[in-house]
Amino acid sequence: MKLKVTSYREFDTRRGVGYESKTNVKGLSIWNDGDGGCTYFSGNEHTTSGKIIWEYSEKYNENQIEVLIDEFLGITPYQRLEEEKKFKAKFNLS
């Protein structure tokens, strides 16, 4: 089964914006806590074992996880690149 994002929600944190995405795999969610850390797989109310989280964490890196979210949100690779350029320019990053 191809992994897909089925829902997405954002929430404010003290350091920015976090998000949770549910997937088409029962018991598997995608999280970013909004505190400057990475995007990662986690369980949800349907999780019965950590095995599924570990399996998908081995298959997908952070960039691949974020691409799944972008696909769900309708963000193209070009749009993502443009947003990254704007962010880097805003903070004088190269």
Image (spheres, rainbow, N blue to C red):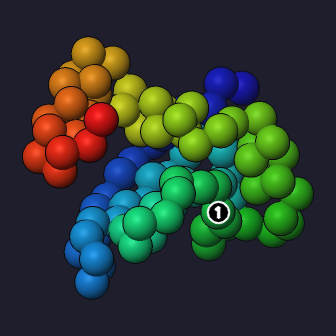
Read off the residue under disc 1: 42
Residue sitting at 36 percent across and 32 percent down?
70
- Please state which amino acid type lies under the numbered disc 1: Ser
Q: Position of residue 21 (x, y in %)?
A: 45, 53
Horizontal arrangement in the rendering, residue 86 relative to residue 51 (left or right): left
**Which is more toward the observer, 54 or 79?**
79
x%, y% of residue 3?
Answer: 62, 32
Q: Residues within 10 Å of mark 1 (few under 14, many from 20)?
A: many
For the N terminus, the quadrant is top right
Q: Is residue 37 above or below residue 78?
A: below
Q: Secondary structure at mark 1?
A: strand
Residue 85 seen anywhere in this rendered image of the structure: yes
Residue in the picture at 28% in, 28% down: 80
Front residue of 7/32: it is: 32
Q: Foreground residue, 30 or 45? A: 30
Looking at the image, residue 53 sits to the left or right of residue 51; the answer is left
Which residue lies at the image location 31% right of the left edge and 59% below the top edge? 9
